[in-house]
Image (cartoon, rainbow, N blue to C red):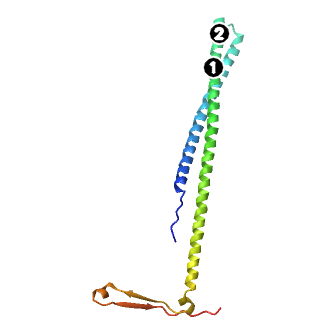
Amino acid sequence: MKRFHFPLRSVAVVRAHRELLARQALAGALQVCAKAETRSAAARALAAKTAADIVAGRGLPVRAGDQAIFAALHGRESAAAAETEKAAAAARAEVETRRAACIEASRQLKIVTRLEERARAAHREGCLALEQQQMEELARSPSAERGAGSAMVVGTASGRAEGGMSEFQFESPPAEKRKI
């Protein structure tokens, strides 16, 4: 039986490597997205707390300068929350991009894997057909038809070295013909 050789093996290795890199990139993007979501939630909570403090302090007498400082602080907190929300949205978009790349790399790897499976199946079928053909030829040989035994002659090196040919003959008994 001849050995299996897949001509696209190098392509399969490269595609498997690309798929691994795509998975790693997706995992990294998911981590960045989770951190961005956490920062965004913290910034929104801080902006909401600042707004709640301002609202709670409205019943108390507040100087105009303090009111301006509170408004500026709330504005900065709201702007920071908006920026972190934009960063979180960008991270989510990056995750989707990486996910699509991972799916495509996986699809490309599956294509080559299926081609290799088909090539292996074809190779296996070809080898089985060749073995079957050899068995049929062996069955059709003249010695098989007559039911006669086979003979084998073996020459030894020691017999040749002594100037003569030392031969041993092995014969198998003739096979009995079966009547079907």
Q: Residue 96 versus residue 18: which sits nearer the camera?
A: 18
Name the side, left or right, on which 52 lies relative to 153.
right
- As displayed, is residue 120 above or below residue 35? below
Quarter of the image where one finds residue 24: top right
Residue 117 in the image, given as x and y percentages of width and height: 60, 61
- How far from the left and from the top, in percent, is residue 3? 51, 67
Q: Which residue is mark 1?
A: 77
Q: Marks 2 and 1: in contact by CB < 8 Å?
A: no
> Horizontal placement of 153 versus 35: left or right?
left
Image spot of residue 86 (x, y percent): 64, 27
- Kind of residue at disc 1: Glu
Say the numbered circle drawn on residue 68. 2
Q: Is residue 140 visible?
A: yes
Please count the marks in the image.
Answer: 2
Residue 50 is drawn in which quadrant?
Answer: top right
Amino acid under label 2?
A: Ala
